[in-house]
Each structure stands twice: as structure tokens, then as C-alpha cells.
Image (cartoon, rainbow, N blue to C red):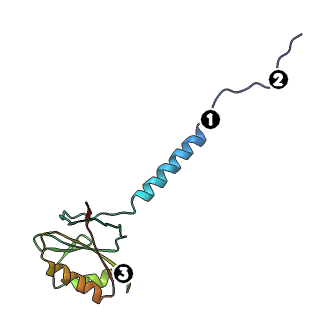
Amino acid sequence: MNLQSRNKVDAAFSMASMTDLIFLLLIFFMLTSSFITPSGLPVNLPSSVASTIEVQKVSVTVTKDLLFYVNDKRVTKSTLEGELKSKLAGPKGVVVLHIDETVPTREMVFVAGIATKLEARVSIATKPK
């Protein structure tokens, strides 16, 4: 009496669905990791106990040599207002200040005053303690 099964079990495992899942996770992490864009200019930021992450729309950087940059583009102090006006889409924009800790406070107040005049929110970038 010969009892053989007609259905043979295939022992091979298909990795196609596993690789699809890995690629989807890779794409997800690549997209979500690029939401925070740090300023590309080397500035020694002051430290703060409470530090929140603000989505940058317009970044204004003042270096220790009192050079002004708007989104990594160098501008003069006199053309700063015009450059900010063109970068801000309208009222309720966000301006993030990246100011070196050795820069006098009057420069920070000057830039914040221009941003407030243009009806933009002002946020000061700090490094956490």
C-alpha cells in the first residue's frame, strides 16, 4: 500500500514582502529626519534650560564679526529689512534668530525690531544645557 501525498509542501520562504517593508521604513525615516534644518553658519549660541524646536521659515544669523545673514545669504545691516520683507510671505511669519553669544544685545534688538515691524513672530535659537 503506497500512501503518498499529492500536495508537496514548499519549504522556500519569499523575502519579497520583507524587503518591501524595509524599503518603506527606510523612506519614512529619511523623510521625517529632514524636518529640522539647523543653521549652516558657525555661531556660538547661548545656552538655555528650556529649549523648544521651532520650524524655521526665515533664519537670521549674526556672527561675532557683526555680519548679517538671511537664510545663509549675506546681507548688510541697511538691506536687512528689505530682505526680510521679501522672504516673509506675509504677516504671521516666523523669524528664528541665530545670534552669537558675544554679539551686543542692541544688534539682537535691532533685528527683532525689524521682524516685529513686519508682523512676524521672533524666536531666539539657543543650545540646550
Mark 3 packing: few (<14 Cα in 10 Å), some, or many (20+)? some
Left or right, residue 113 beside residue 121: left
Q: In front: mark 3 or mark 2?
A: 3
Q: Residue visible at 30% across and 83% down?
A: 86
When the figure is inspected, residue 112 is found, relative to residue 98, above or below; the finding is: below
Q: In front: mark 1 or mark 3?
A: 3
| Closer to the camera in the image, 37 or 11 | 37
Badge 2 amino acid: Arg
**Where is mark 2, residue-wise?**
6
- Which of the two discs, 3 and 2, labels the residue nearer the N terminus? 2
In terms of image quadrants, where is residue 71?
bottom left
| Contact (Cβ within 8 Å) of mark 2 with mark 1 | no
Which residue is situated farthest in the bottom direction here?
117
Q: CA distance from mark 1 to mark 3?
A: 51 Å
Point out which mark residue 64 bears: none
| Closer to the camera in the image, 66 or 5 | 66
Which residue is situated farthest in the front direction here?
49
Point out which mark residue 14 bears: 1
At mark 2, the secondary structure is: loop
In terms of image quadrants, where is residue 55?
bottom left
Q: Residue visible at 54% across and 42% down?
A: 19
Position of residue 50 measured from the top left corner of the image (x, y, whole percent) = 31, 67
- Which of the two discs, 1 and 3, labels the residue nearer the N terminus? 1
